[in-house]
Image (cartoon, rainbow, N blue to C red):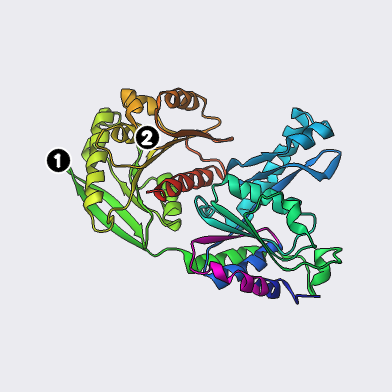
Amino acid sequence: MYFSDRTDAGRQLAARLDHFKGHDVVVLGLPRGGVPVASEVADALDAPLDICLVRKLGVPQQPELAMGALGEGGVRVVNERVLREAGVDARDLAAVEEREHIELDQRALRYRGSRPSVPLEGRTVLVVDDGLATGATALAACRVVRARGAARIVLAVPVAPRGWTARLGGEADETVSVHTPELFYAIGQFYRDFSQTPDAEVVACLDRNRAGHDPIVQDTTVRIPMATGVSLSGRLAVPESALGIVLFAHGSGSSRHSPRNRAVAEALNRAGLGTLLFDLLTEAEAVDRAHVFDTPLLAGRLTRATEWVAERQESDGLPLGYFGASTGAAAALWAAGDPDSSVVAVVSRGGRPDLAADHLARVTAPTLLVVGGRDALVLDLNRRARSLLRCESRLAVVDGATHLFEEPGALEEVAELATSWFTGHFRGQ
């Protein structure tokens, strides 16, 4: 017996990972038992802690045999060889996926609530569990983390059987185990206390870590002067050591007070991104519906706000991006298509890119188009618009969501997609 409990195992494992302290690493625990172990590692390394949610796709008549895995953010890993040898057809695979998707979403909501996952793009990620037996879950976790953009993956466990690294097939860049005994029957044999980890403990570990790592945000009410003599109200929020700043262009009938845009902005702030929420029109102008759909006017004001942000001390040369919602997405793409545009990434939520007209083909900033799966008309418009884009682009469909993303978990998925897109492209600047 090597460990008194998972806390003790985490401390012993952390001692083996001390060389990562001071580096830009993220620690991911595999729920549920891996989270208290990962929590000790994250504390020792002063690193952010998150969960790595993975659901194994088991062969219908042989569920212990993995034919693939599902991860958050639409990550899907399928083993074609197992599918072929087990004779699993598309219908059977879809049924298993549907069931596991539901469980994945329920666990994400249970453990994280409305908070987005920690961005992994371009970072070193430590995947931690309380031990490794068959390696199937760890293998799937590594594949999911790689698909989410991790630059380097370290799989770390307190105990694993001798020769365990061969089971991973090179999916991890580095492996660490405190003990590798010759006689290995089950992970629990190496713990004095190996009782089941309750959901409440998983949530407590995550909350405790977040309290120490949520960035301090400088939040300021601002007035943005326009060339026409009017000034627009806004709210500029910039975390310490921000990666970049995202300017929001809201849709028709909305304003800087939009609860949906505010929710996304808060998620970006927690991920270390600055945000500017501002009104594209004055109160008097907003009464005239013609102004609401005046894309050149709105794009011009977004461009001026971009110049204003770039001149602020808070920006300090940080990369800038646009988040456009509904008709505001047209303004964002129109402005991004200007030859002098300085933005490095664009995200459209339920956008009307068709209103950007021929400016679409001029956009050079990588563009993410996020559309609800049940928003048929807008989905079709975005598919057509993507064919006109000449820049790096992606169309992300949020299953089951309508135009306003009011369904449970839909807006959280938008926030996660936007966070990943901006952090990934801001880090490259």
Q: Label 1's element?
A: loop
Bin the neighbour count of mark 1 within 10 Å (Cα to Cα): few under 14, some 14-19, many 20 and up: few
Question: Residue 227 — which label?
Answer: 1
Residue at (30%, 54%) from the top-left corner? 236
**Is 16 within the magenta?**
yes
Alpha carbon distance from label 1 to label 2: 22 Å
Query: Residue 250: horizontal and vertical position, in percent?
Result: 35, 40
**Is 157 within the magenta?**
no
Query: Residue 186: horizontal and vertical position, in percent?
Result: 84, 63
Query: Residue 177: horizontal and vertical position, in percent?
Result: 70, 66
Pointer 1 with pointer 2, Cβ within 8 A: no
Q: What stretch is highlighted in magenta?
A: 11-32
Q: Determine the residue located farthest toward the left in the rendered image.
A: 229
| Amino acid type, callout 1 | Ala
Residue at (44%, 48%) from the top-left corner? 264
| Amino acid type, callout 2 | Ala
| Quarter residue 313 falls in | bottom left
Name the residue carrying label 2.
329
Dot placed on the residue nearer the N-terminal end, 1 or 2: 1
Count of number-bearing discs: 2
Q: Label 2's element?
A: helix
Question: Residue 312 — which label?
Answer: none
Give whichever of 270, 429 is nearer the camera: 429
| Quarter residue 160 falls in | bottom right
Q: Is residue 289 visible?
A: no
Bin the neighbour count of mark 2 within 10 Å (Cα to Cα): few under 14, some 14-19, many 20 and up: many
